[in-house]
Amino acid sequence: MDYNNWKHRAIEVEPSLRIAYIDCPSQTKRPERGVILLIHGFPQTSYQFRHVIGPFSRAGYRVLVPDYRGAGGSSKPVTGFTKAIMARDLVRLLTALEIHEPVHVIGHDIGGMIAFAMAAKHPSRVASVNWGECPLPGTSVHTEDRTTHAVQQFHFIFHSVPDLPLALVAGRERIYLSHFFQKLAYNTAAIKEEDLDHYVRCYEQPGAMRCAFEVYRAFEQDAKECEEWISSYGKLSLPALCMSGDQSRHLDDAAKMFAEVHQRGTYEVVAIPESGHYIAEENPEMFVAEALRFIETATVG
């Protein structure tokens, strides 16, 4: 089924905040096996999961794919970009859709940070969590990316500067977004011109780049909240998976990062072959296979 043929909707999850989402039902005749919630990253939208929605639904799952606040078809608010607030948005989306059972959460990049916040602060809504390809604020890996690896991760600092990034990128969104896909993808052919066109149209919308920068500007608060949460409540104990591209720089630090925030024995790290940062687009077959293997193991466990 084509991306444009899935059920695209938007719903108000709080006054003046609309969350756009794709809702794809299970495509099997057997009883639904559960709900998979997919959370995108930057510079992407729900569109990044276009290759995996169908396979997940054919495996018997209902698949829910939102645009987080500020991105895609969702509202472009002025505030509210800590990952805890963005996670709360998605919990409210589940409630609005009358999904009350725990869901399997898969987050990539910024979506990985949101997925972790959702698992930490709303554990009753999460059956398993699969997050990666991001240095989680509040971990030593994130600190190193802002210092030791600052050239590679220049945008962490650049996006946090008030006003200037927006002034420099406005009207040059295609040049700017292309940089990330060319730099971070291993299979660069996976992001075709029409895919880049889609992302550029999304981030050319009024307010979209401003919101994207606010997501990064909130990292310091995110770090503080994560550190306080782990100090108060301890490491997460629910089943967790990190999927990282085998050609991605994030793979090297994934196990170290997970050990800081997940209890020993509750998580695993998997390298997706022939993939850089954008694993759901570069190698969707293995993305689906490893995600389903983990979900089915977590469900049995």
Image (cartoon, grey):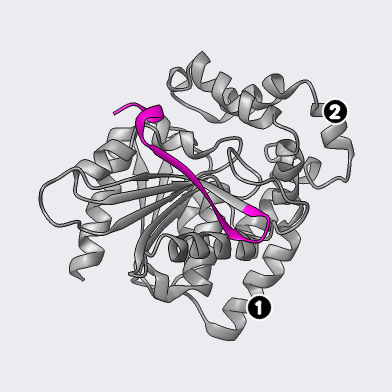
Q: Position of residue 26 (x, y in %)?
A: 23, 47
Looking at the image, residue 48 sits to the left or right of residue 152; the answer is left
Residue at the location (48% across, 17% down)?
A: 192
Which of 82 and 160 lies nearest the eye of the viewer? 82
Which of 283 and 87 lies nearest the eye of the viewer? 87
Q: Position of residue 88 (x, y in %)?
A: 57, 65
Numbered range of the magenta stretch: 1-17
Task: Kindly give the residue lying farthest to the top in the view shown.
Answer: 193
Mark 1 sits on what residue? 228
Q: Position of residue 283 (x, y in %)?
A: 35, 31
Three-letter code, disc 2:
Leu
- Could you tell me if residue 61 is visible in this image? yes
Quadrant of the image containing the C terminus: bottom left
Task: Kindly give the residue lying farthest to the bottom in the view shown.
Answer: 232
Quote the CA–CA distance across marks 2 and 1: 35 Å
Q: Is residue 299 above or below residue 58?
A: below
Q: Quadrant of residue 299?
A: bottom left
What is the crowding at mark 2: few (fewer than 14 residues within 10 Å), some, or many (at least 20)?
few
Q: Is residue 161 above or below residue 180?
A: below
Which of 291 and 264 lies nearest the eye of the viewer? 291
Which of 6 and 274 lies nearest the eye of the viewer? 6
Which labelled disc corresponds to residue 299?
none
Give the tally of numbered discs.
2
Which labelled disc corresponds to residue 168?
2
Q: Is residue 109 above or below residue 140?
A: above
